[in-house]
Amino acid sequence: MIPGYPKPWKSYQEQLDQLIARGMGVTDNARALDYLERIGYYRLSGYWYPFRERVDLCLLDPQTNAKPKKVKVERLPLDEFKPGTTFQNAVDLYVFDKKLRLLVLDALERIEIALRVDISHGLGKHHKFSYLKPELFHQSFSGKLDSKTGLTKHHGWLSKHAALINRSNEDFIRHNKDKYGLPLAVWVACEVWDFGTLSTLFSGMTEADQDSIAKQYEVSNGRIFATWLHSLNYLRNVCAHHSRLWNRNVVVYPRLPSTEETPALSPFQEARQRKPFVLLVIILQLMKVINPASSWGQRLKTLMEQDFPDLSHLGLDLKGMGAPESWQTLDW
């Protein structure tokens, strides 16, 4: 028998009543119901989750059921909200997060386009069909076989590339196919590659080619730069799927250069909480290379200064997204 899901369906009014019963302040019931209907209880719950009361829980040793020598304490969230929590607090945080995602996507679009040029130009000097040539890539990418599939990472990448070409309805793709046939030159094919395809291909390039591109962005080590692209692709997926960003735990965390090379990233060298602010600083560095006159950094700073809601009564501020004490002194 399939175990039953324990939580029952609730009407919007019942959802609101439950929030009020748990200590959330609501001054405009009609407006709160409208938000629940348009945004949804489950999506908004990610924003009021930090507002819930916590209780310290000491975990016992699972083998002896006794208190371990090294005590591990976890903060268990309760259903009740902290005093002073309001429904509007969650909505304001949701709106800030939406603006943050849109601003990040704006920068990532420009970075993606610049990388298409960098990668296609760098590979194109070797061969116009360079992406098909395994000898032009690192052995771990184009020569090492997966023990389960018997394929290389390059094989997998080529399958993704072929799918992107085949489903493209772009006029320039159709024109090049009709006039020159397949394969397409790298500087044409790159225009249908998404951020993930670019990131994967960069990770498979030779160290010399990686370093050549990375140095354009003031990063000496191309392998470190590859982790930046991997993390930014993760970030793009978060934003593109409208997921919560501001205090998310970054599961694809980038490697960082030495503090001498990138002083702006020095506060994150020993960061225990892997939050998204470090990725915003990385984007800022890339944007300053791609478009030094861009106002993106200033717009980001203004957003954080003016649009992050006052949640001090709930013990929340920009530290929750990984911002260091000195974040305002960065070269925005």
Image (cartoon, grey):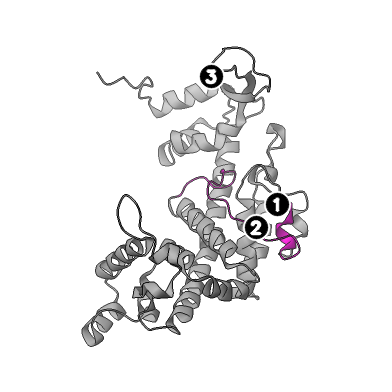
Q: Residue 332, how many percent across, how many down? A: 71, 64
Label 1 near label 2: C-beta < 8 Å? yes
Kindly report the distance in space between the C-alpha atoms of the residues bearing marks 2 and 1. 7 Å
Tell me where the magenta segment starts and ends, as one range: 242-268
- The picture quadrant where one finds residue 151 is bottom left
Kindly report the distance in space between the C-alpha atoms of the residues bearing marks 3 and 1. 43 Å
How would you rate the neighbour count of disc 3 (Cα within 10 Å): few for under 14, some for 14-19, many for 20 or more? few
Task: Look at discs 2 and 3 and give the one toward the viewer.
Answer: 2
Q: Which residue is mark 3?
A: 21
- The picture quadrant where one finds residue 281 is bottom right
Q: Residue at x 45, y 66 (%)?
A: 204
Of 321 and 186, nearer the camera is: 186
Residue 269, numbered label? 1
Residue 258 in the magenta stretch? The answer is yes
The secondary structure type at the circle numbered 1 is loop
Q: Is residue 118 above or below residue 67?
A: below
Label 1 near label 3: C-beta < 8 Å? no
Q: Which residue is mark 2?
A: 256
Question: For the residue marked with disc 1, what is the amino acid?
Answer: Gln
How would you rate the neighbour count of disc 1 (Cα within 10 Å): few for under 14, some for 14-19, many for 20 or more? few
Q: Residue 26, how many percent across, how many down? A: 56, 29
How would you rate the neighbour count of disc 2 (Cα within 10 Å): few for under 14, some for 14-19, many for 20 or more? many
- The picture quadrant where one finds residue 190 is bottom left
Q: Residue 188, how many percent across, how many down? A: 36, 80
